[in-house]
Image (cartoon, helix red, strand yellow):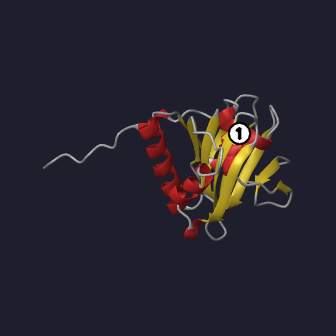
Amino acid sequence: MAVLALSFSAEVGSVALVHSAGFVARESARKVAGATPGMMVREVLQESGAPSPLAVAVALGPGSYTGVRMAVSFAKSFALVRGIPLFACTDHAAIAALYAQDGEEVLVRHQGHGVRDYWSRYRGAATWPTCLSAESLGVAPPADGLRVLGDRGSHHVNVQVHARDLGGLALCGRMPRAELLLVEPTLPQAV
């Protein structure tokens, strides 16, 4: 099995085709300002011998609003047209899934706008981390001895979500399936 994964919430967007054999066929990364998901996906899928993706995984942010919107729109369309599953999670949930130990509480935090941070608190689990406090934009609470994951804090693990990470989480069956993202948009009622 192969998963096409997209992460466009950070300054650098990435697309990866991850095989069930546990390796990335190819990953393409570019500054979000000059890249489109379609262009990067085409590059990855044109790699010789690249298998056809049987699922799509996408990061939901927080982060670059335009980058996330482009990636989610592309991922939804790609999955819907091909009739394949779509997996999605926030960057914070993915970071907690990748780096928090089973039962460990962590503070996930990264730079937001100005002095404000995007932050949330998670408890690691073998299946999927539990969100203990929803993502928020503002001044993060004190870590109170918790390990800080992300790009902010004095005692932190500096991590961000790459497409290859998302693909790996989807392949191992840990990432939630995103049925609600495929709901048809409702049109405004005529007056």
Q: Which residue is mark 1?
A: 168
Identify which residue, 89 or 75, lies in the foreground: 75
Q: Residue at x 58, y 58 (%)?
A: 40
| Residue 115 lies in quadrant | bottom right
Residue 91 pos. (x, y %): 65, 49
| Residue type at numbered disc 1 | Gly
Secondary element type, mark 1: helix
Where residue 84 appears, as percent x and y from the top left, is 50, 34
Residues 165 and 18: in front is 18
All told, the count of numbered labels is 1
Q: Nearer the viewer, residue 168 or 174?
A: 168
Instruction: Determine the residue positioned at 67% across, 34% down.
Output: 171
Q: Is residue 177 visible?
A: yes
Q: Is residue 155 above or below residue 48?
A: below
Residue at the limit of the structure toward the left, as seen here:
191
Asked if residue 12 shows in the view, the reply is no
Q: In the picture, residue 189 is in which quadrant? A: top left
